Amino acid sequence: MFDESLVVQSAVSAFNNAALVAPTFFWLGLFSIPLMALAYLYGRDFLGKIGWNPNDLEKNASIFTVGLTLLWLVLFGGNYMVLRDAASVLPFCIAGLIFVCAWTLGAHGRDIQMPKWRGASWRRKLAYILVIAMIVWALGVSAMHTWLGVLMQIVAFFGGGLVGRYIRRTPRAVPMALFVMFVVATLMLMQPEFFRFGELGALSVLHMGALLVFAMAALAALVLRNVKSRGRIHHSAYVKLKWMARFVVALGIVLFFMTESVPVFLGLSVAVAGMFALSVWHAGDVASDLASRMLAIALGMFGLITTLPVLSALGVLIWISAPAGRFDKDSRFLL
């Protein structure tokens, strides 16, 4: 007779064979190409429909990215029982990220009128209680299953929201989004099995390459926004410093692929940021569209590694809304 278990075994074998050829996020990115094409062709019409001004696109996209990352951290269903280390700082890092995301959203949402408890009908009060209870339940379930883990995430979310709403210091949206994305990418490298990044936590060259491309694009976007071009470094000194930076970065890339180490990744990121800052500070002029396009690449790669194609499509929208320029020629000086 026909054995139904053979179908299951065959399907599992086919999935494993596909995963050996390329990681899951690669296949998701491949299947998301039609969505990216639609965003590229009809993105400007879509932005007009939702009322996003091109001048505020990067700010709105960054706030949306922080909000979606917060939802992803809470709802994607990470399992703390699969961690390789008996004692891990991951719960504290995720709670810190939730605080930062809630702080950013609270600070940029001060103009939103909060529901009023006093004078509300009992039905509205019941609806408020149910919404708060659902938020608390989602935060508690997604946390480490101890009283400390549950309380830590709940306090981080509500504390961050209150700090952002009532302390009159608004963080800049784009740097905060880049910071949140970079920390998430670092945590994915630190504990890939928790984020289902890689096959049972084993990272391939494509995994590490995607992380490296994202980190370089995010650091370039951050440096281009915060370092001013001066053109004051003597050319001979600049050439020597640049070759020294290239050597350190190349060595860091080799060590990163050999070790898959978080300290090496962070050290490499510092070296890359320093090389980019040196290039921008020495440059006499920087193309006006370069920072936007680097942000678009960072969003696209972050959406790819986190399997959030909406963020990749958002990167496409930023790319097509950037001022006209030659990206390959304008960005060459960074390297």
Image (cartoon, rainbow, N blue to C red):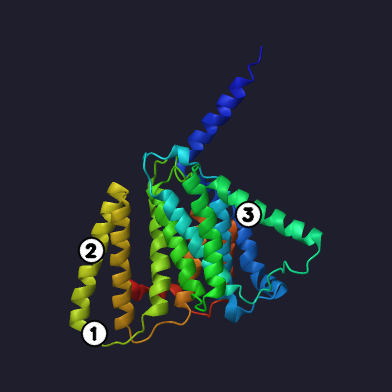
Q: Secondary structure at mark 3?
A: helix
Q: Residue flagged by tag 2: what amino acid is it?
A: Val
Q: Could you tell me how far apart the alpha carbons at marks 2 and 3 are, in whole angstroms?
A: 46 Å
User: Percent x, y for residue 104?
Assistant: 53, 69
Q: Badge 2 is on which residue?
A: 248
Residue shown at 45% from the left, 39% from the top: 199
Quarter of the figure that contains the N terminus: top right
Left or right: residue 56 versus residue 248 is: right
Tell me the mark number nearer the camera, choosing from 3 and 1. Answer: 3
**What type is the residue that disc 3 sits on?**
Ile
Q: Is residue 210 visible?
A: no
Q: Residue at x 49, y 42 (%)?
A: 146
Q: In terms of sequence position, does the residue under pointer 3 or pointer 1 come before the other?
A: 3
The answer, for residue 252, to whether it is visible in the render is yes
Label 1 Cα neighbours within 10 Å, binned few <14 / some 14-19 / many ≥20: some
Give the answer, above or below, for where 148 lies relative to 247: above
Q: Quadrant of the C terminus?
A: bottom left
Point out the residue furthest to the top here: 1
Quickly name the residue at label 3.
135
Q: Nearer the viewer, mark 2 or mark 3?
A: 3
- Front one among 119 and 61: 119
Dot 1 lies on which element? loop
Q: How far apart, in angstroms, are the residues tagged by discs 1 and 2? A: 20 Å
- Name the N-terminal-most of marks 1 and 2: 1
- Residue 73 position, x and y percent, is 53, 53
Left or right side of 71 for 205: left
Up-down relation of residue 37 to residue 15 (above or below): below
Contact, mark 2 vs mark 3 (Cβ under 8 Å) = no
Give, as a three-letter code, the residue at label 1: Ile
How crowded is the residue under tag 3: few (<14 C-alpha within 10 Å), some, or many (20+)? Answer: some
Q: Which mark is residue 233?
A: 1
Residue for point 33% across, 63% down: 269
